[in-house]
Image: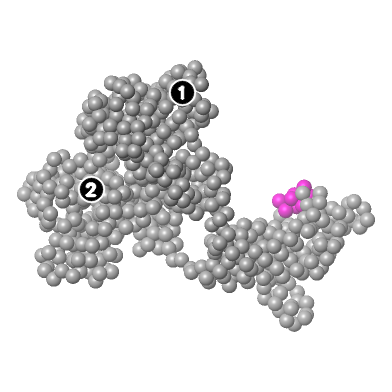
Amino acid sequence: MMDKKQIVILGGGYAGVHAAKALHKAFKKQKDKVEITLIDKNSYHTLMTELHEVAGNRVDEESVKISYDRIFSGKMVNVVQDKITNIDFKKQVLTGEKSTYSYDQLLISTGAQTADFNIPGVKEHAFYLWGLEDALKIRTHIEYIVRDAAKEVDEEKRREMLTFVVAGGGFTGVEMMGELIEWLPVLCKKHGIDFKKEGRLILCEGLGNILNMLPEKPREKAVKRMEKKGVEIMLNSLITNVEADRFTTKNGDVIKTRTLIWTCGVRGTEFCERLPLSDGRIGRKAVNEFMQSPDYQNVYLAGDGMWFIEDNRAVPQIVEAAEQTAKTAAEGIIYTIKQELGLEATPPKPYKSNFHGYMVSIGGAYAVSHTAGISLSGFFAVALKHIVNLYYQSGVCGVNAIWAYIKHEILEVKDKRSLIGGLATYKIPSYWTVFLRMYLGVMWLIEGIKKIAEGWLTDTTGSKVYWGAPADAGSADSLASASQAAVETVVETVASASQAVGDAASGAVQQLAPPLLSQPLGIFTWVNDTFVAQAPYFFQIMIVLAETGIGLLFLVGLFTFPAAIVSIGLSIMFLIGAMAGKEILWYIAVSIVMLGGAGKAFGLDYWVMPYIKKLWNKTPLAKKTYFYLDEPEFTRKQMEKKLGRK
């Protein structure tokens, strides 16, 4: 048996993940002939474009991390956590801190790092924003500096401590400033500081404009937004020297500050720069139009670390470029491997960029964008940015990523820092839902018991559920028809809570409210004629069991979510069948509330659901569809084993 073709991807950023998924799609039917390995120093993919939100304390760090296990679950991509220290291109071997890895085809997508342009003091005294650790360091520093400023009695030192500077007027710099605009007033208020009076925000740019990749109109709106929020924008102010408590510009300006966040540019990583491959510029390695290194035909580069001139301009270091260069590189690898395996192969196409536009957020509630030739600002630009992010995350990790993004970007953001402000952030304590859950359970249980008492289980004619004209009770048609009296019986069974309790107390039969609909909807009649009429007694029993069952489940808090789904379904059935009054809307509304995990508060779901979720997350279907339930699907031991740790 011949050895498998080894494809190695170094780096799990936007380019690496995109390439790995493309390679899996191409070779999933050749698992016995091809092996794909992705090597990264972390166990997770980082959403680099959202790091400013972590640095500005808008979202927690978990919101920008997506586990490789989830991304490649059910895929033929082996993920190895290791730090590669050297590559021998002649022997085709990568050397890491833990092991060595041979390859037939290699894709290098190690990304980039912050460029300091050899300006004195930047590396020692400025804060970078090019990784999760950088973002966390900025957030922690700002929290401490504000706390210390609240204790400082020296006015000059206090001003220095409350002066926050972002160097660089590109996308990262402006987005970081947007977070500071929102967060600092809230943080300072907690420490008794009026930031509007004492604080200072500065955006320092060495060129004559900020956001040079945007047209003039959205760029001007971004400037106006920041200036309205009190930001001083210093243009043509190239920083020439940085010290621990100040920096100097080429104009001779000296700004005293304890917080300088550096976003003035990126370059290829030091690791990539050391590789014996043809150089491009600023640490990036040259490639041809197929993203191949001119030195080795089986070595490709993609993302921020490659250098390629298109239309007299270098391919920009943006997400779309990373994904598109990864696609080109993957096509080249696929073509080569398939030819070697004797499979039909389509020759790769030369790289051609197709950028859709640019979006820049200035905090959680404002943004500017220019996509498809259309410029937007404010609410609509923020909404567009969310849509694009949702599209990306759905492709990476399915529906789970979409829901997680909606929660941490909109529903759970504090201090009104989201698209809808704070309208969805208040959370009702779960113990309040216990009483509502049990009350709903009692109501459904009463309905089920009433039906049993009325003979639903013993009357085998099926006349309780079928909507239609009465027929001869002894004929076969009687199993598929019912009298109008049977309809009235069904109406009476869906009693409101107050009416059921009142009847039981007084012993008198009260007239229920008339049905909301005078006639059943067509879809209800069709379901009855198509399905129920074929086995009316069966459906009659199922309704009794469903009502009794969900009543008991709500009472003990077991399988509350599926019970709520059934509750909503039954209620809608009664509603569209013209068999229920306005009280049925109460059932529907409360059932929707139950979907939020009400069974975990003083209910059996507290113990049962984590176990069920754990079992489900291990199934092939969950892995294939990315439809994981929201419990951790891997223990630490399993994670370490998966990532190649000993």
Quarter location, residue 48: top left
Which residue is tagged 2? 128
- In screen coordinates, is 506 left or right of 314? right
Q: Classify mark 2: residues with Cα within 10 Å, few (<14), some (14-19) or many (20+).
A: many
Amino acid under label 1? Asp
- Residue 169 place in picture, x, y as percent: 22, 46
Which residues make up the magenta segment? 522-530
Which residue is tagged 1? 3
Whether residues under marks 2 and 1 lie with C-beta atoms below 8 angstroms apart, the answer is no
Quarter location, residue 303: top left
- Can you say whether 176 is above or below 41 in the image? below
Amino acid under label 2? Tyr
CA gap, disc 2 to disc 1?
44 Å
Magenta-drawn stretch, dominant element (helix, strand or loop): helix
- Can you say whether 90 is above or below 616 in the image? above
Residue at 81%, 68% in the rendered image: 454
Residue at 39%, 52% in the rendered image: 63
- Residue 93 place in picture, x, y as percent: 33, 27
Circle 2 sits in a helix, a strand or a loop, which is it?
Answer: strand
- In screen coordinates, is 623 left or right of 177? right
- Verify whether residue 523 appears in magenta: yes
Residue at 25%, 35% in the rendered image: 271
- Residue 51 place in picture, x, y as percent: 32, 49
